[in-house]
Image: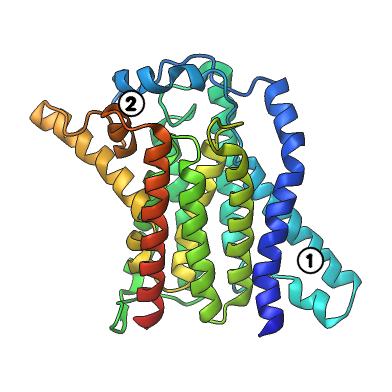
Amino acid sequence: MGLNILKVLGLSGIGFFIGILITPVLTHYLYKYKAWKKTGNIKAISGEEATVINKLHSERQISTPRMGGVLVWVSLVLIIFIFWTASKIFPGDLAQKLNFLSRSQTWLPLFTLVSAAMIGLLDDVLQVRGKGKYIAGGLSLKKRIILVVLIGLIGALWFYYKLEVSSILIPFGENFDIGWLFVPFFITVMLATFSGGVIDGLDGLSGGIFASIFAAYSGIAFFQNQIDLAAFCAVLTGSILAFLWFNIPPARFYMGETGVLGLTTTLTVVAFLTNSVLVLPIIALPLAVASGSDIIQLFSKRFLKKKIFMAAPIHHHFEAKGWPSYKVTMRFWVISVVFAIIGMVIALAGK
């Protein structure tokens, strides 16, 4: 038990400090190459000009670098490489224990994180070159959806054929086998979680929320005795907190698609690995609310010809009502922590 706690909490702390250490290098290059959007004229997904958001954030969009999410996944990859290498060089129990790269628990989330983060990085690069069309980045929404579906398909087939998983756990009930429908269900969940990436809209907002979510899943995995997966989520949590250290107002950089796309798709994989996907909307409630508010706004404007919110996603609505951005951010943090704990309790008690 002691070594397991060291592996999870200790590596999480190392993830934080490695993130802090590599930030000056990342910051140097982001500012050297002016990795920010060249225009503050943001458009909504519908193609219309996002007038309220432009009024609130257009100036910061053209002076603050994107791609800060590189800090998160690079820190994780570095730690995995360090401790995997140590386990090959040193035959002792400690070195072997601290290596959390395993086929059954962390290969798939690592593949998902890196592949999705690279797609997001391409999206960010296109955006900072001035080719971004919508608020989410340079790649069109259609192309991003296709790529997320492809990643989701690979993950779904891995679960279905390699891990022989075809059921989902009903909290306080039993596993419900859905057969081949598991594959489209997995892809649908990944797309839904990806849509929650719109939460990355205020300084510090996404960092605090993602840290709470992955900390909860680290706890779930730990109590399920999936120690490698728990360590994976814990290191991600530490790395996200390092990002948050530099993302609190005024942000040194934004997470960008390389962070958001990587984290949302990886979150889907982790939820399925812990057999707690039906609790995901509770643990990740702020993502669900942000995505839902966007969908409601789009539906209302198209069919009712009026806006439900002053601006969407919903955190911009509160800004438009006059709430200071730091108040919106910190209240969302509180909500995120509370529902992450509630979701973790349901996931563990409902088995």
Regarding mark 2 in the picture, which secondary structure is present there? loop
Mark on residue 84? Answer: 1
Q: Position of residue 279 (x, y in %)?
A: 35, 67
Q: Position of residue 188 (x, y in %)?
A: 34, 55
The residue depicted at 88 percent of the width and 79 percent of the height is 91
Density class for disc 1 (Cα within 10 Å; few <14, some 14-19, many ≥20) is some
The residue depicted at 21 percent of the width and 33 percent of the height is 309
The residue singled out by tag 2 in the image is 44
Density class for disc 2 (Cα within 10 Å; few <14, some 14-19, many ≥20) is some
Q: Position of residue 339 (x, y in %)?
A: 36, 62
Quarter of the image where the N terminus is located: bottom right
Identify which amino acid the numbered label 1 is placed on: Trp
Regarding mark 1 in the picture, which secondary structure is present there? helix
Which of 127 and 246 lies nearest the eye of the viewer? 246
Quadrant of residue 35 in the image?
top right
Which of 174 and 19 lies nearest the eye of the viewer? 19
Quadrant of residue 103 in the image?
bottom right
Q: Position of residue 326 (x, y in %)?
A: 43, 36
Left or right: residue 290 versus residue 240 is: left
- Dot 2 or dot 1: first in sequence order is 2
**CA–CA distance in space, label 2 to label 1:** 43 Å
Left or right: residue 277 versus residue 102 is: left
The residue depicted at 20 percent of the width and 40 percent of the height is 296
Identify which amino acid the numbered label 2 is placed on: Ala
Q: Is residue 235 above or below residue 7?
A: above
The residue depicted at 69 percent of the width and 56 percent of the height is 15
Quadrant of residue 31 in the image?
top right
Quarter of the image where the C terminus is located: bottom left
